[in-house]
């Protein structure tokens, strides 16, 4: 049996139900990290923003054990719900999920017309020679802030300031991410498969991202026929949190052109 989303998976819904659909996919930090994306896109889209299985205290099903499994499950949910012309917007690991969805949809006629465009924001998932992904699981909180933020002081979270519940969720999210993405947070075969994508694609990277660098992002864009690449100034791995105005200036023209 193909992987499927749990019936109780939580979808945050925003925007006009009659507007074009945007599926917003969060990264390892959980759904709160894409809240600005949800709010902004809701001005022009019907936004669906799921909490991935295994994040924020939810169960991880036995049949979802990789990014590919999760991508397949999301595609099948879109198909079952008769969604059409969906724009995928993924952040970090969510960008990887979005790319995997786009590749799978391109290779299966049953998904024709389901995906309209894809936006990968500082996504991981591929292997680029000379541009290794940072060893996320080896970073302490200070090191993570240094790697992921243009202004590390804004991104640093003192573990002592967290509640016991917050620490438990953070640890559980990390365990789920390790299960789904692996320590390398990449699939060695994905880069070569990106050439199958034939829908509009935008790869946007914060100029100061050191989890995966802008040069890494350029390699991803170069592998997708016709894809656009853009750097967001004064931002790291989460440009929509750190410099939202500059992020919208990159994303909005692309979304308008791809409608």
Image (spheres, rainbow, N blue to C red):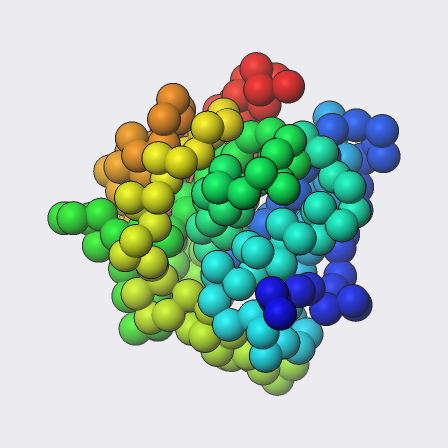
Question: Which quadrant is the N terminus positioned in?
Answer: bottom right
- Picture residue at 51% right of the left edge, 72% below the top: 65
The image quarter in which residue 10 lies: bottom right
**Relative to residue 173, is residue 44 drawn left or right?**
right
Say if residue 69 shows up in the picture: yes
How many labels were placed on the picture? 0
Which residue ends up furthest to the left in the rendered image? 130
- Please provide percent x and percent y for residue 238: 47, 46
Q: Position of residue 50 (x, y in %)?
A: 69, 55
Q: Which of the two residues, 145 or 79, is positioned nearer the viewer here?
A: 79
Residue 140: image x %, image y %?
A: 35, 72
Q: Is residue 65 left or right of residue 149?
A: right
Q: Could you tell me which residue is drawn at 62 percent across and 58 percent down?
A: 73
Q: Residue at x 85, y 29 (%)?
A: 18
Question: With respect to residue 98, does 250 lie above or below?
Answer: above
Q: Quadrant of the C terminus?
A: top right
Q: Compare residues 104 and 10 and report the one nearer the observer.
A: 104
State the image coordinates of residue 130 (x, y, percent, origin top left): 14, 48
Give me the residue at 55% from left, 55% from top.
Answer: 71
Q: Residue furthest front?
A: 109
**Is residue 150 visible in the rendered structure shown here?**
no
């Amino acid at each position: 049996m193909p992987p499927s989303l749990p019936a109780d998976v939580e979808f945050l819904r925003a925007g006009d139900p009659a507007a074009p659909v945007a599926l917003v996919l969060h990264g390892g930090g959980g759904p709160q990290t894409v809240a600005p994306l949800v709010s902004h896109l809701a001005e022009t889209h019907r936004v669906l923003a799921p909490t991935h299985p295994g994040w924020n205290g939810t169960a991880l099903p036995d049949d979802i054990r990789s990014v590919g499994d999760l991508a397949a499950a999301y595609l099948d949910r879109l198909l079952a719900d008769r969604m059409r012309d969906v724009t995928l917007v993924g952040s970090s690991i969510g960008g990887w999920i979005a790319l995997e969805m786009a590749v799978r949809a391109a290779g299966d006629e049953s998904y024709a017309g389901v995906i309209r465009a894809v936006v990968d924001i500082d996504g991981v998932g591929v292997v680029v020679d000379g541009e290794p992904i940072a060893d996320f699981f080896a970073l302490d909180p200070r090191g993570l802030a240094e790697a992921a933020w243009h202004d590390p002081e804004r991104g640093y979270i003192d573990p002592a300031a967290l509640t016991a519940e917050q620490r438990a969720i953070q640890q559980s999210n990390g365990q789920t991410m390790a299960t789904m993405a692996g320590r390398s947070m990449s699939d060695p075969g994905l880069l070569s498969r990106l050439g199958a994508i034939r829908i509009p694609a935008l790869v946007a990277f914060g100029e100061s991202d050191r989890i995966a660098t802008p040069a890494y992002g350029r390699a991803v864009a170069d592998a997708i026929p016709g894809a656009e690449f853009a750097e967001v100034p004064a931002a790291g791995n989460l440009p929509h949190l750190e410099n939202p105005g500059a992020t919208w200036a990159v994303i909005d023209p692309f979304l308008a052109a791809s409608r």
